[in-house]
Amino acid sequence: MLHPLVFFDDFFPLAVAWFPNVSWLDLSGNNFTVLPECIQQFRFLRYLYVDDCEHLREIRGIPPCLTDFSAVNCKSLSPRSTSVLLNQQLHQGRNTQFVMPGGRIPRWFEQRSSGASISFWFRGTEFPYKSLCVAILLIHDIPSPLEVSFIVTFNGNQVQQGWRNLIDQLFIFNLERCSYYYESLHLERGWNHAKFSYEAYNDYKEKVPSESIAKEIGMHVWKEESSSIMEDIRFTDPYKMTQLIIMMMMLSIAFPNHKKKPLLLETCIGLWTLLFLTHTLFLG
Ligand SMILES: *[C@@H]1O[C@H](CO)[C@@H](O)[C@H](O)[C@H]1NC(C)=O
Ligand SMILES: *[C@@H]1O[C@H](CO)[C@@H](O)[C@H](O)[C@H]1NC(C)=O
């Protein structure tokens, strides 16, 4: 009987010597324990898959052009050992897609939301997919393996249900990945509301309720120097902000005296209570 080829730790130094120019390596289901430093010598390696490498417990090197990394069901890989994959520089301008077990969403994802969806508002003639990076964190003991597909809703209309991807607990990817979905978008003048979420499927292609597996979702906006992207993206509803401003103007009309003389204590308390209420009602 022919045994399938199984690679151990001695594979990498040989591989770097024999085929230094590979761009794609699928090493799923092998027996090595370490991704050694020498994999940095794969100068053109963009895709590296190590799914089901159950003995893999350490990552010491990252190829310089890596864009796709998948470590689904690598049970020995700890959050400490995957932390090297969470570096912001590794994902910036690289259109990456990384799947790995465990850990948490890196701190550089400035916007977070618990559960399986995140909302934001943007304006302009184009959906700013090139500037957005998403991180999905699932609960610790997911019924693996899971496949997810992504759902983006614009102004209430679901416009795409993207490709499916095998994932583990932590999935980081740049939205530029699925740019072709966004090209024919009909955008409104002013602020557009976008909601990003996902659906999950188990091994038997049955839908798994996302509430039962979702932990957190994070979003990062790539800000290039001299770019004004942050003026055109908001994570709180700009229309509610407008309502709040109108409310405050109405209050100042209702209490016109405060410009002429110091506010009475009662008026002051009343005003602050109203402000507090509008704030919690509209922005909460
Ligand atoms: C790898 O690429 C380099 C530069 O592009 C080239 O000089 C070299 O011959 C290639 N090596 C192999 C084994 O193909
Ligand atoms: C890979 O490791 C597993 C678990 O230690 C072992 O059962 C299996 O025989 C190994 N494979 C080879 C080809 O040695």
Image: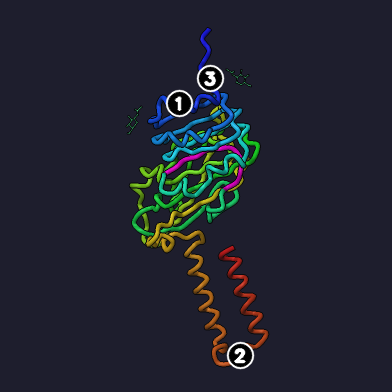
The stretch of residues the image draws in magenta is 95-105
Q: Which residue in the structure is indicated by mark 3?
A: 6
- The quarter of the picture where residue 77 lies is top right
Q: Residue at x 44, y 49 (%)?
A: 92
Q: Nearer the viewer, mark 3 or mark 2?
A: 3
Amino acid type, label 1 = Ala
Amino acid type, label 3 = Val
Residue 210 drawn at (x, y percent): 58, 41
Residue 155 drawn at (x, y percent): 44, 54
Decide which of 117, 37 is in the foreground and name it.
37
Decide which of 109, 213 is in the foreground and name it.
109
Residue 262 is labelled as 2
Q: Is residue 29 among what the camera can see?
A: no
- The quarter of the picture where residue 60 lies is top right
Whole-number angstrom distance, CA of label 2 to CA of label 1: 79 Å
First in sequence, mark 3 or 1: give its number: 3
